[in-house]
Amino acid sequence: MKLSTVDSLSTVNGTQWNALADDDNPFIQYDFLRALEQHHCLKNWGWQPRHILIHDDDILVGACPAYLKHNSYGEFVFDWAWADAYQRNDLDYYPKLVSSIPYTPARGPRLLARNNDKEIKAQLIQGALNIVERMNLSSAHWLFCEQDDIAVLKDKNMMIRFDYQFHWQNQNYESFDHFLEQLNSKKRKNIKRERRIVAEKNIHITVKQGKELSNEEWKILYQFYQITFMKKSGTATLTLEFFQAMAHKLIAIFAQHENKIVAGAICFQGKNTLYGRHWGCYEDYDSLHFEVCYYTGIEYCIHHKLNYFEPGAQGEHKLARGFLPVKTQSAHYIADEGFRDAIGDFLQREKRAMLDYGQELNTASPFKKNE
């Protein structure tokens, strides 16, 4: 078997890549990753592709999406303090190697292997370490990994870090009201109140597949994406052309008031999961964010019999709306032995704090307690 790296997916067989990838997760699919490269979403913002491949003759049997990173923007596993520590010691933290889906804090496979073969995954990890050594990089990182990848990374002595997101799970609900019935009285009443506020303002919600959008709707949806970054002093790194290229996986949620679209959200759909990604609005409307970004998505999952709804990173306010804490994990290799020990100590302290935090979150479940 041959190990190699490429700086573009243009030379990779997309069918063979997808044969290794999880067909539930749209972000690990070849078309998503290739669209990021084709539509100018990466290099200007510090993402330089260095995908790791393993071929058996001409057949792709292993793959790891990876990037040289010149900053920590768009990763959502925060290592700014690590970078600052390097700088204080006159060392370079950047560039580093990151296996992640750019701008996408969603769990998914990172070590793609034929038949989920652990030896192939181990070779992919070694391929990443070879890049670190050859280019004298500070570190390698695998972000938002699935548990089977974490197990192999842990076996290879990578340091493991975890955090929490808030995900909704479909318990074979027949309707939104059926879902509400499972919540305690206080949370159920609050959700009904928030939905009533939106309805009483005569705001109407529509859901469309990306391929159904008109040119004007695409323009408006992209404006909402840009508005949120402008409000937060961030950068809109994804292009309109990228979103249009992913129309077959994109779900648009629009809010209309007085025959005018006033807010919108962008989601992506996998085989079993809806992923909330971006949202924006022209004006602030009470409770509209919850309706567009959470409740409509839950209804969509119930109607289409999707098992999960992942609305994005962070946000304890999601807990009160039926989204429960779920652990997300990453793995890290630090080349410098001294910093490796220091960061390892930090991660042990952080782990204890995160376990306590997880217990607090679980006690705050909005669902009825079993009698």
Image: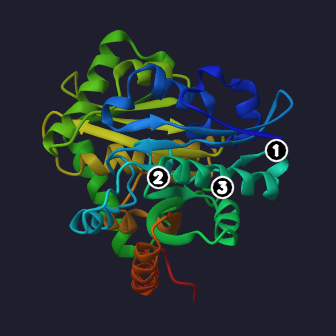
Indicate the position of residue 365 as horizontal and vertical percent values: 45, 77
Q: Secondary structure at mark 3?
A: helix
The residues tagged by marks 3 and 1 sit, at their Cα atoms, a distance apart of 15 Å
Indicate the position of residue 353 as horizontal and vertical percent values: 39, 85
User: Which marked residue is nearer to the observer: mark 1 or mark 2?
Assistant: 2
- Mark 3 = which residue? 125
Q: Residue at x 47, y 17 (%)?
A: 212
Q: Secondary structure at mark 2?
A: loop
Q: Residue at x 39, y 74 (%)?
A: 185
Q: Alpha-carbon neighbours of circle 3 within 10 Å: few (<14), some, or many (≥20)?
A: many
| Amino acid of disc 1 | Arg
- Mark 1 = which residue? 114
Vertical position of residue 137 compared to residue 262: above or below:
below
Vertical position of residue 59 compared to residue 324: above or below:
above
The residues tagged by marks 1 and 2 sit, at their Cα atoms, a distance apart of 30 Å
Q: Alpha-carbon neighbours of circle 2 within 10 Å: few (<14), some, or many (≥20)?
A: few
The C terminus, quarter of image: bottom right
